[in-house]
Image (cartoon, rainbow, N blue to C red):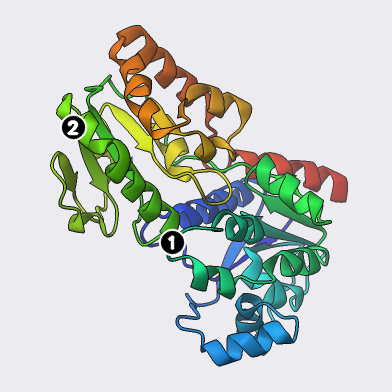
Amino acid sequence: MRIMVVSGIALEGPLQGDRLRLKGIVAGAERIDETWVREVGSLSPGGQPWLRSIFQMAMGQSPYMTWYRQQWASGKAAPSPDLLCAFQLRMAPLALSLGASYRILDLTDSMGLYRQSLVGVPGARKKRLWLRGIDRDEVTWGSRFDEVWVSSERDQMWLAAHGLKTHVIENTVLQRTLLKPGDPRHLLFVGNLEYLPNRVGLQQFLDTIWTRLYQVGYFLTVVGKGSEDIHVPGVKGHGYVPELRPYYEAAGVIISAVPMGAGSQNKILEAMGWGRPVVAHRDALAGLSASQRDAVIPVVHPENWLSALQILDDSGAYRERARRGLVAVSALGDPVARRLKTLQSALG
């Protein structure tokens, strides 16, 4: 079964959540048969003119998909694979123009759900306008594929309520390594702060509870683009770093103060893959599986952060949470390979 993956981003580059998801799809496909990836530029719409956005919405079109559909309008012919996987919604128009016996659309996360999560978030108005009508586009384009993948049950239920049936192909981790226990008072936050949910979530954490935690002996390391601009007592921002292992080894506990977004929180899964206990905002767990949620210590209100973190002062509780998390995550490519093997048998 010859497989083609059509992607708007390259496999190589800084390992953000989307690229890790893409690597998992390719790794799983390569276990089945010959696979090739067609990379169609790293296009980004940048600053969409507001007049054009308003016109598109008036015509019942989402600015997001209208822009990308225009880019793929002159798609070139390519060899016809047995199975084609389009990586994320923006690739749907191009993928449907290419010959294939069976087509899969990997939405990864529902952008409609993401748009809904941004309601009331400071600075999110332009993003919500850009994604207006995206729910309809996800259903319209997704229904033209033989099947659609998402990363979590939360996305699956959201899209089902809008009329689109999907398969859950969970996100994975690059490694599953149980590091030696670290200092439970040394916290680590990993995330690109150019991504709005990361930036807002971390800022709320620093504004509401960090001073109290710092006063009782906690210190925080932040890694990710934009974190070099943080200047808060007890917090060290390192900006983008090419290798994360040293930071996971140095820290004892990983925090996720991100109460919004879509799909599963990849950085929570990554921390579990390193054998690090995770304390996270309760809403960040909605996209995780039951076993993954069971491994995380949830925080409901800002004042609960200290009591949640203190659970891990007990070495037994620390080791048990680390073990649960490691067992709960899947290795790169495993979920994709399982699904493709099922399809291979069904399609002959």
Q: Is residue 234 above or below residue 261?
A: above
Secondary structure of the residue carrying tag 1 is loop
Q: Quadrant of residue 281?
A: top left
Instruction: Between residue 286 and residue 28, name the one nearer to us.
Output: 286
Q: Is residue 174 above or below residue 119?
A: above
The image position of residue 111, as x and y in percent, is: 62, 60
Instruction: Between residue 337 and residue 182, name the one nearer to us.
Output: 182
Sequence-first disc among 1 and 2: 1
Q: Quadrant of the N terminus?
A: bottom right
Q: Which residue is mark 2?
A: 214
Q: Residue at x 43, y 45 (%)?
A: 258
Instruction: Between residue 152 and residue 337, name the one nearer to us.
Output: 152
The image position of residue 30, as x and y in percent, is: 60, 51
What is the CA distance from the residue labelled 1 to the residue labelled 2? 26 Å
Q: Which mark is residue 122?
A: 1
Q: Residue at x 83, y 43 (%)?
A: 345
Q: In the figure, is residue 147 to the left or right of 204?
A: right
The image position of residue 33, as x and y in percent, is: 66, 52
| Mark 2 closeness class: few <14, some 14–19, many ≥20 residues within 10 Å | some
Q: Quadrant of residue 270?
A: top left
Instruction: Between residue 284 and residue 46, name the one nearer to us.
Output: 284
Q: In the figure, is residue 73 to the left or right of 274?
A: right
How many discs appear? 2
The amino acid type of the residue labelled 1 equals Pro
